[in-house]
């Protein structure tokens, strides 16, 4: 004791060297016991949506089983925890508009009814996307015919859901990583004008719906600049864009918190709202990080790429909880710029990240586990919010 109090005379570098490992272990043990992922203090709020009620919508993507109510266990968790919904698949063109002259609104109508009954913000995903694209788009040779069919596609959907869908991903994933425009069928057939036209056509039918541009890797500086250029061009034509959707398919260590914050700030300077539209945080190795890695069969069942088949170690559970906490800290700091945070799925077992980018893995990216029990990450963001509010009231 005295030797630490009287540093000058007694603590020599050699004593410090001896003490360091002991102190290190003490700190580690105390950190571990503070953040045991299986111990949770009781919370003042009952759900995510209550916790963030005054900040932004808390949304979730719904799969078919939840929408058709066959998975009532999941549905009950959705109703309790979330106040916004997005359809994970059933509003994509291949499903909702399978043939040029026929729509398939059955599931989408169930989806919006569920949202209405439960007083939720309903987000439409998505009007224009090159992926999960209905085959008839590819079959139209003539450019003018293509343009008019695309206009009808947008307007028919916007009209069917007018006054019901509160916000739309009007265009999804139109950008390359370097910020140039993706050479999609829409760009090829209609030129860059398809972007402003898509926003114009949607707003003509449903002027009250909030219209978003949505994409992944929106924190990547080059892509971000491309998105900003694109939105400015649309705005310069007097056409409205209400928001930018950052998909939020993120990892434990990337993107950096600085990049996330910087992106929110830069997008909001466009005078639009920012939504985090498809949040999930993969805890698995990312094949794109491995140099020269090919996503091939070889990766599929390798232990290296799929290390947690028997459960997530506590240390990684804590890492995930801390990552969610750090990210939500930024969201709360900029809550005036953020309209909605939507998780891309309810429980880990339902996440598309079990199958992408490598099939057959066991991933743990969401707030609820495979039994739909809240994980440490769930408690970490609610705990953060409680601290945030306490700080606000004391300041
Ligand atoms: C994914 C769904 O989650 C999967 O079920 C489907 O097989 C493929 O699409 N960006 C998007 C989402 O905008 O629509 C994608 O959803 C994930 C990436």
Image (cartoon, rainbow, N blue to C red):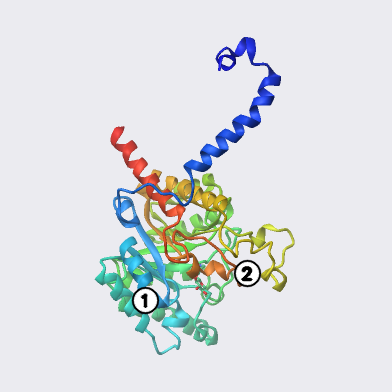
Residue sitting at the far front = 1
How many numbered tags mark residues here? 2
Can residue 156 be seen here? The reply is yes
Is residue 57 found left or right of 350 in the rendered image?
Answer: left
Q: Indicate which disc residue 207 carries.
A: none
Q: Indicate which disc residue 67 carries.
A: 1
Residue sitting at the far top = 9
Residue 326 x %, y %: 48, 46
Residue 71 x %, y %: 38, 76
Q: Nearer the viewer, residue 263 or 278?
A: 278
Residue drawn at x 35%, y 71% is 75
Q: Which residue is mark 2?
A: 358
Residue drawn at x 72%, y 63% is 293
Q: Quadrant of the N terminus?
A: top right
Instruction: Residue 96: name its quadrant.
Output: bottom left
Is residue 228 found left or right of 163 in the rendered image?
Answer: right
Label 1: few (<14), some (14–19) or many (≥20) C-alpha neighbours in 10 Å: many
Q: Nearer the viewer, residue 152 or 389?
A: 389
Which secondary structure, mark 2? loop
Residue 358 x %, y %: 63, 69
Residue drawn at x 52%, y 66% is 173
| Tag 2 and tag 1, C-beta contact below 8 Å | no
Q: Nearer the viewer, residue 335 or 304?
A: 304
Q: Find the distance from the CA under tag 2 to the CA under tag 1.
A: 26 Å
Residue 134 x %, y %: 49, 82
Label 2: few (<14), some (14–19) or many (≥20) C-alpha neighbours in 10 Å: some
Q: Nearer the viewer, residue 394 or 140?
A: 394
Q: Quadrant of the C terminus?
A: top left
Can residue 141 be seen here? The reply is no
Which secondary structure, mark 1? helix
């Amino acid at each position: 004791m005295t030797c630490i109090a009287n540093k000058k005379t007694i603590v020599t570098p050699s004593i410090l060297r001896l003490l360091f490992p002991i102190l290190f272990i003490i700190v580690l043990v105390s950190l571990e016991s503070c953040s045991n992922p299986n111990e949770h203090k009781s919370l003042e709020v009952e759900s995510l949506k209550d916790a963030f009620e005054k900040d932004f919508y808390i949304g979730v993507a719904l799969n078919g089983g939840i929408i058709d109510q066959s998975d009532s266990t999941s549905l009950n968790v959705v109703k309790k925890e979330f106040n916004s919904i997005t359809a994970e698949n059933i509003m994509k063109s291949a499903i909702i508009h399978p043939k040029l002259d026929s729509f398939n609104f059955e599931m989408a109508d169930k989806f919006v009814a569920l949202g209405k009954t439960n007083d939720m913000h309903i987000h439409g995903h998505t009007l224009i996307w090159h992926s999960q694209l209905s085959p008839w788009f590819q079959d139209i040779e003539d450019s003018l015919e293509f343009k008019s069919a695309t206009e009808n596609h947008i307007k028919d959907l916007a009209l069917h859901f007018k006054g019901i869908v509160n916000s739309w991903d009007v265009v999804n994933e139109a950008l390359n990583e370097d910020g140039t425009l993706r050479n999609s069928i829409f760009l090829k057939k209609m030129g860059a004008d398809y972007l402003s036209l898509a926003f114009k056509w949607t707003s003509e039918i449903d002027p009250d719906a909030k219209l978003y541009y949505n994409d992944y890797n929106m924190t990547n500086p080059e892509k971000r600049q491309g998105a900003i250029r694109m939105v400015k061009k649309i705005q310069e034509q007097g056409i409205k864009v209400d928001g930018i959707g950052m998909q939020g398919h993120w990892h434990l260590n990337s993107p950096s918190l600085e990049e996330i914050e910087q992106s929110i700030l830069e997008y909001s300077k466009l005078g639009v709202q920012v939504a985090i539209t498809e949040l999930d945080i993969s805890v698995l190795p990312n094949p794109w990080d491995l140099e020269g890695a090919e996503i091939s069969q070889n990766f599929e069942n390798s232990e290296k790429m799929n290390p947690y088949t028997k459960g997530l170690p506590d240390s990684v559970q804590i890492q995930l909880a801390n990552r969610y906490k750090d990210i939500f800290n930024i969201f709360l700091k900029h809550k005036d710029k953020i309209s909605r945070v939507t998780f891309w799925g309810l429980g880990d077992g339902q996440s598309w990240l079990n199958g992408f980018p490598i099939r057959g893995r066991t991933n743990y990216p969401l707030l609820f586990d495979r039994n739909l029990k809240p994980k440490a990450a769930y408690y970490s963001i609610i705990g953060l919010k409680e601290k945030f509010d306490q700080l606000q009231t004391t300041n």
